[in-house]
Image (cartoon, helix red, strand yellow):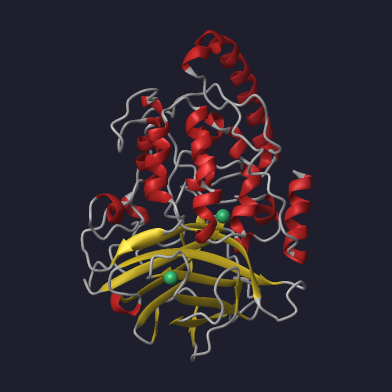
């Protein structure tokens, strides 16, 4: 934990090129493969011990959660404001000509907690409308002042002065608005404030299934896995139910972003002494939910956060292939995941309606991701079931749903769509 922390901290301050461990890091044996059934009793015993350890650990440590919550030790402990959790891209409920972008960050805000925004962090939606994985438009947000009287500065959408992992402010005029109430910025409706975290997931059980995804369990414990099912309905728990999150929600005319297919991702950036030019340096990026958390070694998150979608085909695909192989499923499963989720951007088709998750790629509709989409079940059904490929070999039906779904009370039917905070 300590070394990972220091590594992240060094990278924030110096942005030394991260050392790639991608070729050597492999997902450990996470699930009992068919040929290992004979060892199941041993694995179960180990699992009980590990579960007991986890229980003890959880009682002395702060909660460890994820969709992409707490995806590196540095973000979880030193700069929670830059910890991105979920990105949503969806059709407006009130105007079919509009699209909505929502970015969540700074997770695990407890009920009633008033957590300030951090003016050191630059938040950006990045939109590629030419299909090359390079942003053509950006939307920028940054809070002003510390303490009482905070406000937020909005810039864009506009053509970035610099693409990639360094950023500068857009040159065009900016709009300043209040926190925690909707305001207008040009043709956009904007909300920046605290919301109920819309993500839902039985993470407690997920960390029993794949404990090395937990930042509190680093370096990767071995041997992981013996638990091979989510909890049944009635016993499954939405671990994120008690928590709020910071959110940026923007509703704007589709035509401001493009006319056809787009890829959207989000980034957080900070100033660093390494950049003498004063540019902001990317510290996290995120788009497709559960991609990093399910397939990627925890230790690789930091490196992935410092990359751009143009590198995903080379860098991310190997983790997906390795994971699928480790759980004993055919390579066709990995091919299916890679075809819809790489590069790591939320795809949407602005010329279409009636979006469904991965619908741009699979169904020719708007695509995108709505706050109520059960992305865990969709992803788990592809990886552990036969949802997309029709491949049944090695399927693990008990892992195809976490048996937690969206709760209506956590959402709003209209802007800003995410429910009021606890
Ligand atoms: Ca994150
Ligand atoms: Ca582009
Ligand atoms: Ca679910």
Q: Give the residue at x 72% y 59%.
A: 17
In the displayed structure, 135 sits above or below 357; it is below
Residue 284, horizontal then vertical, whole percent: 59, 60
Residue 389, horizontal then vertical, whole percent: 31, 35
Can residue 109 be seen at all in this image of the molecule? Answer: no
Q: Toward the viewer: 263 or 172?
A: 263
To which quarter of the image does residue 187 belong?
A: bottom left
In the displayed structure, 255 sits above or below 54; it is below
Outermost bottom residue: 173
Q: Toward the viewer: 137 or 253?
A: 137
To which quarter of the image does residue 250 belong?
A: bottom left
Q: Give the residue at x 76% y 65%.
A: 13
In this image, 204 relative to 281: left or right? left
Residue 82, horizontal then vertical, whole percent: 61, 63
Q: Toward the viewer: 306 or 115?
A: 306
Quadrant for ligand 1?
A: bottom right
To which quarter of the image does residue 211 belong?
A: top right
In the displayed structure, 411 sits above or below 262; it is above
In the displayed structure, 43 sits above or below 186; it is above
């Amino acid at each position: 934990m300590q070394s990972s922390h220091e590594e992240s901290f060094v990278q924030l301050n110096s942005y030394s090129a991260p050392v790639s461990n991608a070729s050597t890091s492999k997902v450990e044996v996470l699930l009992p493969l068919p040929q290992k059934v004979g060892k199941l009793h041993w694995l179960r015993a180990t699992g009980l011990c590990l579960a007991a350890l986890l229980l003890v650990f959880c009682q002395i440590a702060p909660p460890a959660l994820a969709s992409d919550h707490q995806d590196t030790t540095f973000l979880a402990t030193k700069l929670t404001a830059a910890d991105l959790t979920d990105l949503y891209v969806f059709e407006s409920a009130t105007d079919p000509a509009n699209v909505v972008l929502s970015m969540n960050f700074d997770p695990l805000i407890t009920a009633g907690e008033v957590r300030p925004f951090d003016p050191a962090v630059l938040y950006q939606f990045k939109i590629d409308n030419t299909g090359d994985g390079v942003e053509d438009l950006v939307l920028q947000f940054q809070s002003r002042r510390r303490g009482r009287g905070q406000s937020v500065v909005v810039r864009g959408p506009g053509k970035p002065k610099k693409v990639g992992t360094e950023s500068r402010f857009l040159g065009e005029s900016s709009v300043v608005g209040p926190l925690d109430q909707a305001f207008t910025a040009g043709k956009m409706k904007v909300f920046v404030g605290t919301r109920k975290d819309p993500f839902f997931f039985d993470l407690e059980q997920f960390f029993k299934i794949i404990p090395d995804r937990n930042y509190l369990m680093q370096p990767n414990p071995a041997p992981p896995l013996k638990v091979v099912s989510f909890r049944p309905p009635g016993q499954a728990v939405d671990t994120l139910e008690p928590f709020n999150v910071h959110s940026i929600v923007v509703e704007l005319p589709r035509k401001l972003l493009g006319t056809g297919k787009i890829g959207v991702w989000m980034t957080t950036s900070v100033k660093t002494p390494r950049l003498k030019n004063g540019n902001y340096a990317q510290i996290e990026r995120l788009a497709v939910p559960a991609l990093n958390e399910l397939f990627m070694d925890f230790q690789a998150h930091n490196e992935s956060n410092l990359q751009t979608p143009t590198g995903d085909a080379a860098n991310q695909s190997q983790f997906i292939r390795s994971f699928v192989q480790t759980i004993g499923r055919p390579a066709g499963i990995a091919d299916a995941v890679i075809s819809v989720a790489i590069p790591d951007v939320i795809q949407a088709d602005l010329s279409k309606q009636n979006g469904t998750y991965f619908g741009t790629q699979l169904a020719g509709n708007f695509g995108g991701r709505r706050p109520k989409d059960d992305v865990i079940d969709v992803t788990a059904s592809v990886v552990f079931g036969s949802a997309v490929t029709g491949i049944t070999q090695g399927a693990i039906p008990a892992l195809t749903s976490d048996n937690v779904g969206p709760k209506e009370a956590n959402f709003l039917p209209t802007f800003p769509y995410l429910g009021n905070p606890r």
